[in-house]
Image: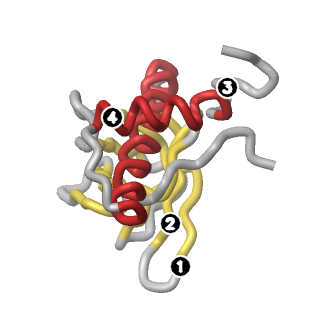
Amino acid sequence: MRSFIRHPSDIPIEYLIEDQPMTGSEPLHDISFGGLSFQSATNLEKGTLVHIRIDTVQPAFEADGVVAWCREEKNHYMVGMEFVNKEDVFLARMVEQICHIEHYKKTVRRNEGRNLTSQEAAAEWIGKFAEIFPNPEPGRST
């Protein structure tokens, strides 16, 4: 059973692979308290260092991580990355909330035809979902 809610997969992520002149821009699959997963056109070996950037939030979220797993899917690879710096774990939680709010904003526009500002979406999302948003650690309250 997962301890942490997974965020919607419509947020773009940029990544740079250790010692390779390659960068990618792919959809972020999910983000949780200890890491994240994203799509890649390339198979990445476990233990590979990865630098990621999510510029949907301001300031942009940047973090380093290590590939924990990589599995082939239909026409891409799904990569799981663990954060290297423990401080990034706490920042990722903020990014996770912002991603949920941005997804909520898009869903409201699509389903209800309302164009919310980020502040309006945040206020509505907090009112509806903040109480059930997961704690940073299982069994611990915030």
Residue 124 appears in the figure: yes
Which residue position is annotated with label 3? 135
Q: Which residue is mark 2?
A: 78
Residue type highlighted by circle 1: Glu
Residue tagged 4: 120
Q: Residue beneath label 1, please?
A: 73
* Residue 121, position as x, y percentages in the image: 37, 39
Few, some or many C-alpha atoms within 10 Å of disc 4 (few <14, some 14-19, many ≥20)? few
- For the residues labelled 1 and 4, the Cα–Cα distance comes to 37 Å
Q: Tell me the kind of residue under disc 4.
A: Glu
Asked where in the image residue 62 lies, by quadrant, the reply is top left
Question: Which secondary structure lies at badge 2?
Answer: strand
Front one among 123 and 59: 123
Q: Amino acid at mark 2?
A: Met
Identify the residue at image location x=36%, y=33%.
63
| Callout 1: SS | loop
